[in-house]
Image (cartoon, rainbow, N blue to C red):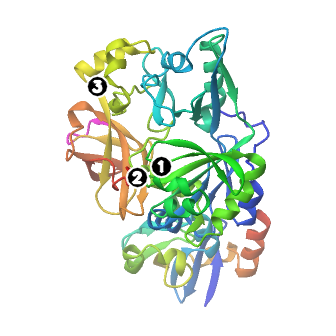
Amino acid sequence: MTDSTEAIKTTALHALHVELGARMVPFAGYDMPVQYPLGILKEHQHTRDKAGLFDVSHMGQVRLKPIASAGVDPAAALETLVPGDIKGLAVGRTRYTLFLNEQGGILDDLMVTNAGDHLFLVVNAACKEQDIAHLRSKLAGLVEVEYLADLALLALQGPLAAEVMARFVPEAATMPFMSCRSAQFNGVPVTLTRSGYTGEDGYELSCPNDAAEAIARALLAEAEVEAIGLGARDSLRLEAGLCLYGHDIDTTTTPVDGALEWTLPKRRRAEGGFPGHAIIVQQLADGASRRRVGIQPEGRQPAREHTDILDADGTKIGEITSGGFGPTAGAPVAMGYVDRAHAAVGTPLTLMVRGKPLPARVAALPFVPQRYYRG
Amino acid sequence: MTVKYTKDHEWVRVDGDVATIGISNFAQGQLGDVVFVELPEAGRVLEQGKEAAVVESVKAASDVYCPVSGTVTEANQALVDDPSLANSAPETDGWFFKVTLSDPSQLDALMDEAAYAAFVEESH
């Protein structure tokens, strides 16, 4: 949590957001655009139809470098903190993984890229200070942990993102999903990853803070691109079934509770060597007592975070962790945790919305098909 | 016909003893895209200052309080069918519900258009 007495931070694009007429809100200690004059609904639809530009510079960018005298591979070192296959990550490839605690609870979710001579990590804004402290304490003397505070991060997302990006970075067009490369954008050295958090094709572009505004303006000058705020980012990722840390996953949920078994590759399950391994292996064998599921409320009324979920007898079986209106789904959409007996797709549920029962069903995730570029 | 406003950003337009109630243009701008409304049924007796309706935008749910006491005569079905009317026509077609006033003197304490404009200016 951010101390409220602490001065609010800004990203390199702050002045541009204000100039564009954004409504600014505090988020994870930063003054961030929740929406622009277009509004959340249209920003969301624009991203699904064309291309949206997001400022995600509040997220933490971290470099893990080998220390020559230690002789430790940073991938091997990082594997002691996460359950993902990092040693098997090829140069130029990116992977989603999780920092875990000793109980198998999730400390944060992150992207890891093998950048050749180092690992490049992108972690959540709200967790970045504790993540960096965690890395420095657990990997002390083994790897060098460098926080890249002088870098901004932009995301260009949507079905036309590739066409737009290729005008500036021709080689971007054929980059596979979850790959990363160094490139030049209008003469500025950038790191481009074909990834994002909207369910759409797109890129994350890391660049020096002092180049961020020019790059953002160049992208916004393209006819297909609109600036998109955090409000639409949230509805986009929810429709795509993607977890928001601190809401859908946290220290009390394991990857198995969170339906994130796909982040647990066979080798790591067998070999272990990451925090919470024994608990997670047990859960994989026996099933977890609760599970994250998609939830489709009937009708038009959204069910928000912390809404109680009841079974047919009126017994509480869980809680919604993310909920709202899905503009592309054209209906309310939600995610939450339910007792394992009620986790099958199609299971009827009752949501207590403002004291009234609202019928709902367990729904398959994602609500909107993911459209990543597979080459 | 007079239009009065509350500090909670509802408006009430009075015609005889019937008051039409909705949310102000400022309020819809703050809420953002409205995706759902829950309106009171005809016959429901509402008390001034109590929750009367719910308006949900993409981002959040908000209560709409009744600016005056009265009995609901009609809810705006067009708004239920197309909640975006609350954004596009907040002070006309996007009205929420109508009540017969039980205490017309309650109107006296509400703000007129000029006072409300000043209130919005001052507090935001």
Other residues around mark 2 within 10 Å, as few (<14) / some (14–19) / many (≥20): some
**Residue A238, percent from left and from top:** 43, 50
Observer-nearest of A75 and A270 = A75
Residue position for label 1: A175
Q: Which of marks 2 and 3 is in front?
A: 2
Residue position for label 3: A289
Q: Which amino acid does label 3 sit on?
A: Ser
- Is residue A173 visible in the rendered structure shown here? yes
Q: Which of marks 3 and 1 is in front?
A: 1
**Mark 2–mark 1 contact, CB under 8 Å?**
yes
Q: What residue type is labelled 1?
A: Met
Q: What element carries label 1?
A: loop
Q: Nearer the viewer, mark 2 or mark 1?
A: 1
For the record, the magenta segment spans A312-317
Q: Is mark 3 on a helix, strand or loop?
A: loop
Distance from disc 2 to disc 1, alpha carbons, whole Å, reads 8 Å
Residue position for label 2: A373
**Mark 2–mark 3 contact, CB under 8 Å?**
no
